[in-house]
Image (cartoon, rainbow, N blue to C red):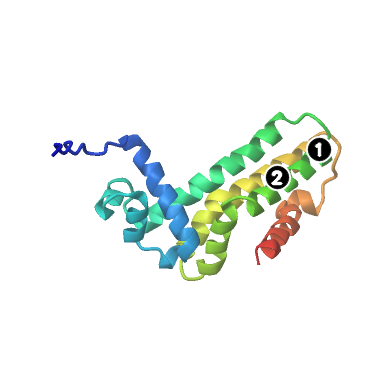
């Protein structure tokens, strides 16, 4: 009879654990929504004890905040890179930004985050505020920068779009929402 090998505890880098928890939470929020997600399920998915979540996140809302940030910040910074590096005509830049924003919404986990906000935001107003601060506010600032660039270069005139840049993105966002329904 052969001797059993001693069990070696599985070691994971502590620094990787928050990312693993956020990834598990992302999948749970996508499948069950915010209200339907239980931290027990997130812990099971991440392969940890439920109490471990609280070492990194004080509450479920903090976990959703991390999901929103991890999902949206890279997308926004990608659009920001386009805006910062493009030297050509501003109308082309604006088309690129709108196209990239649409792709970001429709072809990434951002669509799931948006669906959660639309579907559950009325029950959790703090989620709407978080989404606004993390996504909408930065997107409007980027569009404002592009429009102002066009005005400064003499390519655009002052008008409704310069006064309310949300008008530029509204059709893009509505098209994205329509494609998700």
Above-or-below relation of 173 to 156: below
Quadrant housing the N terminus: top left
Residue 155 left/right relative to 9: right
Rendered residue at 44%/48% (across/down) = 23
Q: Residues within 10 Å of mark 2 (few under 14, many from 20)?
A: some
Quarter residue 74 falls in: top right
Q: Secondary structure at mark 1?
A: helix
Point 74% across, 47% down: residue: 99
Q: Position of 75 compared to 86: left or right?
A: left
Within 10 Å of the Cα at label 1, are there few (<14), some (14-19), or many (20+) other Cα atoms?
Answer: many
Against 89, is 103 above or below? below
- Circle 2 sits in a helix, a strand or a loop, which is it? helix
Residue underneath mark 1: 90
Camera-nearest residue between 124 and 3: 3
2 or 1: mark nearer the eye: 2
- In the drawing, what numbered circle is on residue 100? 2
Mark 2 or mark 1: name the one nearer the start of the chain: 1
Q: Position of residue 21 (x, y in %)?
A: 38, 48
On screen, residue 14 versus residue 172, left or right, reads left
Closest to the observer, 63 or 124: 63
């Amino acid at each position: 009879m052969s001797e059993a090998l001693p069990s070696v505890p599985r070691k994971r880098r502590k620094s990787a654990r928050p990312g693993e928890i956020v990834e598990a939470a992302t999948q749970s929020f996508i499948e069950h929504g915010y209200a339907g997600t239980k931290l027990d399920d997130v812990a099971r998915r991440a392969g940890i004890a439920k109490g471990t979540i609280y070492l990194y996140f004080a509450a479920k809302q903090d976990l959703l905040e991390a999901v929103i940030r991890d999902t949206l910040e890279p997308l926004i910074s990608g659009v920001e890179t386009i805006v910062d590096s493009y030297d050509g005509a501003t109308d082309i830049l604006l088309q690129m930004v709108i196209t990239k924003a649409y792709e970001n919404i429709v072809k990434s986990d951002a669509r799931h985050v948006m669906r959660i906000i639309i579907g559950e935001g009325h029950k959790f107003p703090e989620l709407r505020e978080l989404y606004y601060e993390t996504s909408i506010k930065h997107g409007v600032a980027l569009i404002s920068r592009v429009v102002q660039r066009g005005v400064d270069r003499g390519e655009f005139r002052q008008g409704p779009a310069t006064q309310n840049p949300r008008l530029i993105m509204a059709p893009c966002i509505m098209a994205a929402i329509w494609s998700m329904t």
